[in-house]
Image (cartoon, helix red, strand yellow):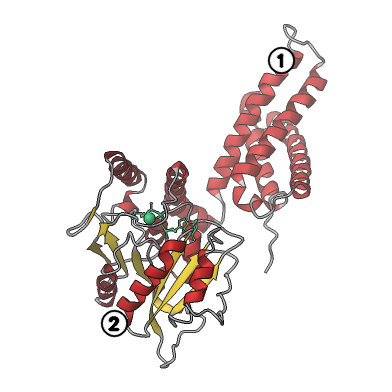
Amino acid sequence: MSNSQLLSLLPVPTGSLQIPELPITSVNASGQSILLSLVIPTYKERDNIENVVSILSQLLDEAIPENYELIVVDDDSPDRTWEVAQSLMSEYPQLRVMRRQDERGLSSAVIRGWQAAKGRVLGVIDGDLQHPPEVLTQLVASIEQGADLAVASRHVEGGGVSSWSAVRRFLSRGAQLLGLMILPGVLGRVTDPMSGYFMVRRQAIAGETLNPVGYKILLEVIGRGSVDEIAEVGYVFRERKEGESKVTWKQYVDYIHHLFRLRVSTGRLGRFSQKAGFPIGRFLRFGLVGLSGVFIDMTLLYLLSDPTTLAWPLTRSKIIASEIAIFNNFLWNDAWTFADVTTKQQGWRQRLKRFLKFNIVCLAGLVLNVLVLNLVFNFLIPNRYVANLIAIAVATIWNFWVNLKLSWRVTDVK
Ligand code: GDD
Ligand code: MN
């Protein structure tokens, strides 16, 4: 390795995970645009990276010379995979390397790589040689023959897994079955929706904001992209020779989370929500959290004020009960309902600020609640329970809307 002069790393794109319609620079040395950008996500692949780059380059130099680029996206591996990759750049002119220090995760790594890509076709392959490189040429050919998406599959002719345990096979198929039940429109379109080895036409996903959790980026591409024709090419998932897999139980949890999220945002409700400009999913979460608050409020009110328990004065009990319920609701809303916003604004000061705002909004909500109850009961529907339901509904919408706009406002202005 002659690394006397290191070539510079690719800057890491920031902001939302959206693929640009047109690559930033779309021409290579000979003045034509590039066909393929192949991302290789890596985490602790020091012992594999050189081999991978050399094999892929050799293959692509023959098939589509100068018409491709390899983009290694490394998540600041402690074994310094990025450094090894960087040292290879002088020897492999089609190689580019990105070192991510602020973000983690396989799927977002792939998308960040695609955002920096120059190609008309965007692809991904593992950096541990478990995906056989020879299949690449067939994937490229499928796209050139008109497919929008070409997936390397373990479950079509020519495909398989080498020596997986019964448990791993079972988990893999179980995950697929679950996915088919939750998102048939997405998982039903390919035989191997778990594949991490595929290529997609840029046009099919450009402009969409991809939002994957965990490992399964292909679900995101099919679910949110506009993919018409899909081709599948069989491959055998090989054993790892160097390094180790990063799959843990967390990937299974992430996967299920991902399925539900895609289901909600691409389902009828999600499309309606988008058209109406109202975040229905968020509102449902907010409502659920609200219910937990009602439960806490009721329980505490009983424990503090009931003659058979502490028998404190009603008002004092109610204030304590509500405040604790508000605190409960805040914690859940902060960690769950508005999780996407809070991850960008952590830190105790900001959290405290959100809590104070939430508290004030909820108190105003309480005033509104009483007001509406009186108005409806006295002038519209002389049934206190129906009137109360209406009052609660109005206060919930108020609480949600104002908190959305005030407490958990996204403040990252470009
Ligand atoms: N940048 C980055 N960040 N890369 C990562 C990360 C991460 O957090 N986690 C894993 N990788 C890289 C690994 O270095 C490897 O190159 C590739 O992503 C796949 O990770 P493995 O840990 O080797 O996954 P696997 O072998 O169990 O699963 C693979 O095969 C499945 C079946 O086709 C993955 O490709 C899955 O996506 C695929 O579904
Ligand atoms: Mn692997």
Vertical position of residue 170 compared to residue 96: above or below: above
Measuring from the top left, give residue 173's x and y in whole percent. 29, 44
Q: Is residue 21 visible?
A: no
Q: Which residue does the numbered mark 1 point to in the structure image?
A: 303
Residue position marked by numbered label 2 in the rendering: 62
316 vs 352, nearest the viewer? 352
Give residue 92's position: percent from left, percent from top: 43, 80
Taking depth in this image into account, of 379 and 338 the one nearest to the observer is: 338
Horizontally, is 308 left or right of 343 in the view? right
Q: Residue at x 54, y 48 (%)?
A: 280
- Which residue is most to the bottom? 30
The amino acid beneath tag 2 is: Glu
- Residue 303 lies, in percent from the top left, at 71, 15
Q: Residue at x 29, y 54 (%)?
A: 192
Judge whether 280 appears above or below 68 on screen.
above
Q: Secondary structure at mark 2?
A: helix
Mark 1 lies within 8 Å of ligand 1 (Cβ measured): no
Indicate if the residue with disc 2 has its beta carbon within 8 Å of ligand 1.
no
